[in-house]
Amino acid sequence: MTSAEEMQAPRPELLLMSSMAELSEMEARSSKGLDGKAHRREARAAPLGPAYLGQMAGPIYRSTKTYDHVEGLSCCFRQWRATHSHCMLLHGYALAFKFVFATRELDQNNWCMDFGGLKSVRAWLHTMFDHTTLVAEDDPALDTFRSLQQAGILDLRILPSVGCEATARYVFDQVAFEIARTTRGRVWLESVEVKEHGGNSAVFSA
């Protein structure tokens, strides 16, 4: 992606960083910079607290947060590999997201996840999925989409892969890192569900 395109389509993983100090620390730990793949490795390897490391035994509290179809996350997809289906054509959904958070230790308010601390997540969801076009990084028509973005016809987001399941994993990787960071490992993201509509959804957990 060219510098101009990066300015038009902000790298989503940067939007969940709350300070330049944290950004500098991440860049120092990643020789490839903060592209999607490097950030996913950091998210998996980020040091987490005892609550996360011990999640396989004992009682667990859970809470959920949903951004429903009325949230306004209307975006356009193209799954170029689905040559047997009309899903290879541009098509759109008003996406909904459900996050499941878990912890062993409630905070001082007896909460699992303080939903007031999710403002950055909500803002990132809108940056990624509000009137945007999502295509895979290996889409043969990628140059065409880039040209359309340069012409001001669409707002492009380039993902490792496209589809409901792939989107659930991508969102999980980004948000899991933020939750671990902001709660210092007390809370972990257990799963993300992405709904295309009332009949279709996909869930990713790790």
Image: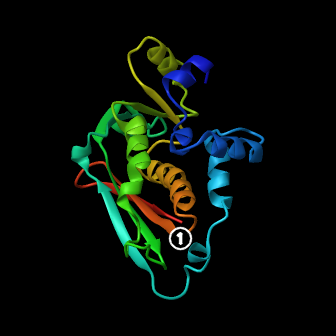
Q: Nearer the viewer, residue 10 or 140?
A: 10
- Answer left or right for 25 relative to 160: right
- Badge 1, how many Cα within 10 Å: few under 14, some, many 20+? many
- Answer left or right for 98 relative to 54: left
Q: Residue at left 29%, top 40%?
A: 93
Q: Quadrant of the C terminus?
A: bottom right
- Residue 18 position in % (x across, y down): 54, 44
Q: Nearer the viewer, residue 61 or 36?
A: 61
Q: Residue at left 39%, top 41%?
A: 123
Q: Quadrant of the N terminus?
A: top right
Q: Amino acid at mark 1?
A: Arg
Against 50, residue 159 (above or below) is above
Please tell me in which quadrant of the rendered image residue 63 appears: bottom left
Q: Residue at left 49%, top 53%?
A: 175
Please tell me in which quadrant of the rendered image residue 21 appears: top right
Number of numbered labels in the structure image:
1
- Answer left or right for 115 relative to 17: left
- Residue 157 position in % (x across, y down): 48, 32
Against 67, residue 187 (above or below) is below
- Residue 162 position in % (x across, y down): 47, 42
Q: Nearer the viewer, residue 203 or 60?
A: 60
Q: Residue at left 31%, top 45%?
A: 95
Return the residue found at the far bottom.
58
Q: Nearer the viewer, residue 59 or 158?
A: 59
Q: Which residue is mark 1?
A: 186
Return the residue found at the far top.
151
Q: Is residue 37 visible?
A: no
- Answer left or right for 95 relative to 7: left
Judged from the image, the secondary structure of the residue bearing numbered disc 1 is: loop
Against 145, residue 64 (above or below) is below
